[in-house]
């Protein structure tokens, strides 16, 4: 269970539920927030996108700093 996108060739997306130690990989942003369930409240300082976070992902430095 993974996803890859042509416009983000160096990234692979995994559902957090498949990770044994998900706490080691904290979220960096919230995307598609317009589609969230009404009872899901996002109360942190991470950047959000109503739809795709593509523009932010394309302009960001890689997580490992390389």
Image: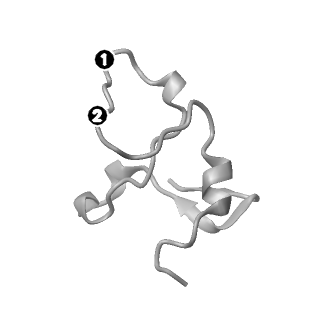
Badge number at residue 2: none
Residue at 54% x, 56% y: name it.
Answer: 2
Q: Quick check: 34 above or below 55?
A: above
**Which quadrant would residue 26 be assigned to in this image?**
bottom left
Quadrant position of residue 59: bottom right
Q: Position of residue 56 (x, y in %)?
A: 61, 53
Q: State the colouring used for the structure image.
A: one colour
Q: Position of residue 19 (x, y in %)?
A: 32, 59
Helix, strand, or loop for circle 2? loop
Nearer the observer: mark 2 or 1; the answer is: 2
Q: Residue at x 61, y 57 (%)?
A: 57
Identify the image quadrant of the C terminus.
Answer: bottom right
Farthest residue to the top: give it: 38
Q: Which residue is mark 1?
A: 39
**SS at circle 1:** loop
Query: Circle 2 is placed at which residue position?
Result: 43
């Amino acid at each position: 269970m993974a996803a890859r996108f042509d416009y983000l060739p160096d990234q692979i997306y995994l559902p957090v539920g498949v990770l044994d130690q998900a706490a080691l990989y904290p979220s960096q942003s919230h995307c598609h927030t317009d589609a969230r369930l009404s009872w899901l409240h996002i109360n942190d300082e991470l950047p959000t996108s109503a739809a795709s976070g593509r523009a932010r992902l394309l302009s960001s430095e890689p997580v490992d700093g390389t």
